[in-house]
């Protein structure tokens, strides 16, 4: 037997009996990586803040922000806005350097977005506040109403029902924030937490004061009114939840690819055929139900203000959808079918 | 409901002086000139009315009644300025006009007992002089023939007139408080069908308190404007 066959046998069964002779390797071509030079300037004063050389062409904006953060520790990446044009739009974190319309020396303009806070923190503070504040009024803690009413309980069953609905609403939102929502931006400006919390907490206190007041007047049409309103409220809560689940399922974790939401097998999502942001539609419906249930003017004010805000947000989202997707369904309205 | 992600930076509103670069069109200019001339004339009528009444009676007392109607008419007419056509900051102007209209109607008109107070005369005179200067300033600016005297007056008189007006306003609101409490004016109490209550007395007190943060801001804004406008002109003159 020749040596080759002996070797082949010795090397075990997994090798093929006739191993192909290795082809001569082609001469290795030196891979030319064109390194980028990155210059970061202040958007307002145009002064040069940092010059980075030997930057990988495949680095993302986030990588560059991390490098900038190293030399300027007070500006963590979430605070930085890098732009190609001082007055233009901020570049996205996931944009890759070599895909941008820059030469091998890229110039970015930096502006400070101000102190940032995680969106989750803001959302949770917004929701825990009203939950606890309402309960304080419900249990009639001291110094809110006249001392003789301290820790007393309302004799109207609609007041107990309203407390359950209000609490359910905010517990649902807290759970959604923790487990369901997927927001593309990681942070928002710090001042938002003060703005948003003031809004939610003050309105919650205002509503709760009247609903749990010893002199509260139950709805004019009694049981019928309360029962109908409760059904509307629950229907819209389930609807809102369905929409949130649907929107979550659109995005894979970590992916920032945007997709058009469509109606699914769940009947509550069929409204997607007519509306871009049905989560806001259902939220409006819930609060209208709550208003009718409690027949309380401050609740009506809260519903109206909320409606105005949500309409502004819905129209913004609708506009973004239409800009991003050319085949976006034309039948859809931002928040109210055919109207708004 | 989910809040929008990432707040956007707010651009500051333009300053109070009208910009010559982005001037309104011919029709808008004509409308504005007429508006400002009418308002100047209106406040002159009020000023003349006050002076004549004072000379006739020989005392400051009860002069409000002589100019009540034109005051209401022309101060309310200033609401047209909030439309945004007039070249000045909508937020600041709007706020000032609303507070003036509030004082004219919701305090002085509504609470008859304060109409004889001297504090009413105090803020009415402050408003009258301020408005005459302000509207003539706008008129001349629109016609591009602004005498330096008017510009100087506009950015200088406020130093005295502003605190004078604020004092008059606060004293008037304070004087109205006991009557509002006694009669329960504009107030709603529980229990009621809509489960709502409003105490106008407390609201007036809160309004007075709000002057503390707001008045200095407006005053210093005007002082900054004064430096910008008057010092810039001086620089220009010396060149």
Image: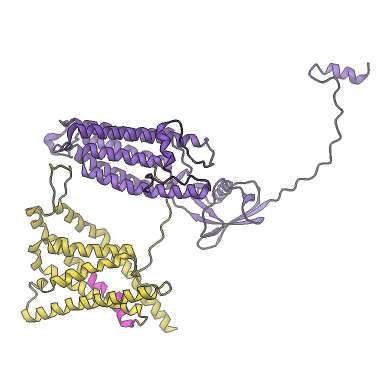
Chain colours: A purple, B yellow
Task: Say above or below: A38 vs B238.
Answer: above
Task: Say above or below: A250 vs A52.
Answer: above
Residue A278 in view (yes/no): yes
Which residue: 50% across, 56% down? A111
Which residue: 21% across, 67% down? B76
In the picture, residue B106 is in which quadrant? bottom left
Magenta segment's dominant SS is helix
Q: Which residues are magenta?
A: B146-162
* Left or right, B31 with reference to A206: right
Q: At which x and y percent is residue A135? A: 25, 34
Q: Nearer the viewer, residue A327 or B134?
A: A327
* Left or right, B25 with reference to B126: right
Q: Residue furthest right?
A: A1
Q: At which x and y percent is residue A270? A: 42, 36
| Magenta region includes residue B154 | yes
| Magenta region includes residue B93 | no
* Left or right, A169 with reference to B204: right
Task: Say above or below: B17 vs A155.
Answer: below
């Amino acid at each position: 037997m020749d040596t080759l066959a002996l070797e082949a046998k010795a090397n075990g069964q997994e090798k093929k009996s006739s191993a192909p002779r290795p082809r001569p390797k082609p001469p290795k071509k030196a891979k030319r990586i064109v390194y980028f030079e990155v210059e970061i300037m202040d958007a307002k004063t145009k002064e040069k803040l940092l010059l980075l050389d030997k930057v990988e062409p495949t680095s993302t904006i986030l990588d560059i922000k991390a490098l900038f953060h190293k030399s300027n520790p007070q500006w963590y990446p979430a605070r930085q806005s890098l732009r190609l044009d001082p007055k233009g739009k901020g570049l996205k974190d996931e944009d890759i350097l070599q895909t941008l319309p820059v030469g091998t020396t890229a110039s970015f303009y930096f502006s400070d977005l101000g102190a940032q806070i995680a969106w989750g923190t803001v959302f949770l503070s917004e929701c825990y506040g009203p939950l606890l504040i309402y309960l304080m009024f419900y249990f009639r803690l001291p110094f809110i109403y006249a001392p003789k009413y301290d820790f007393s309980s309302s004799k109207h069953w609609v007041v107990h029902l309203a407390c359950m609905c209000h609490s359910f609403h905010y517990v649902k939102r807290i759970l959604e924030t923790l487990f369901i929502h997927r927001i593309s931006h990681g942070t928002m400006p710090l001042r938002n937490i003060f703005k948003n919390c003031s809004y939610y907490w003050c309105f919650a206190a205002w509503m709760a004061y009247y609903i749990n007041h010893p002199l509260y007047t139950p709805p004019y049409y009694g049981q019928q009114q309360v029962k109908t309103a409760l059904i509307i409220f629950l229907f819209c809560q389930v609807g809102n939840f369905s929409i949130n689940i649907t929107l979550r399922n659109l995005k894979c974790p970590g992916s920032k690819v945007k997709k058009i939401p469509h109606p699914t097998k769940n009947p509550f999502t069929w409204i997607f055929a007519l509306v871009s942001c049905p989560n806001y539609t259902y939220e409006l419906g819930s609060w209208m139900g709550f208003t009718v249930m409690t027949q309380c003017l401050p609740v009506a004010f809260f519903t109206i203000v909320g409606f105005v805000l949500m309409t502004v947000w819905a129209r913004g989202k609708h506009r973004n959808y239409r800009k991003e997707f050319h085949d976006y369904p034309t039948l859809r309205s931002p928040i109210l079918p055919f109207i708004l | 409901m989910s809040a929008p992600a990432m707040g956007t930076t707010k651009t500051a509103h333009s300053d109070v002086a009208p910009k010559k670069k982005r001037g309104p069109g011919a029709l808008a200019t004509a409308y504005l000139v007429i508006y400002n001339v009418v308002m100047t004339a209106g406040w002159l009528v009020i000023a003349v009315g006050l002076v004549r009444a004072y000379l006739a009676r020989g005392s400051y007392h009860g002069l409000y009644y002589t100019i009540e109607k034109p005051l209401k008419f022309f101060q309310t007419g200033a609401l047209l300025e909030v439309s945004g056509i007039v070249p000045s900051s909508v937020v600041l102007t709007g706020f000032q006009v609303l507070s003036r209209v509030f004082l004219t109607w919701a305090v002085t008109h509504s609470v008859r007992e304060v109409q004889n107070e001297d504090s009413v005369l105090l803020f009415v005179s402050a408003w009258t002089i301020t408005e005459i200067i302000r509207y003539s300033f706008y008129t001349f600016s629109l016609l591009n023939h602004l005498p330096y005297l008017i510009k100087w007056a506009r950015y200088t008189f406020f130093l005295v007139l502003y605190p004078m007006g604020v004092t008059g306003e606060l004293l008037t609101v304070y004087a109205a408080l006991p009557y509002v409490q006694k009669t329960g004016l504009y107030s709603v109490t529980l229990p009621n069908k809509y489960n709502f209550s409003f105490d106008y007395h407390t609201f007036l007190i809160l309004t007075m308190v709000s002057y503390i943060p707001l008045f200095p801001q407006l005053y210093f804004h005007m002082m900054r404007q004064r430096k910008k406008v008057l010092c810039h002109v001086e620089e220009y003159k010396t060149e």
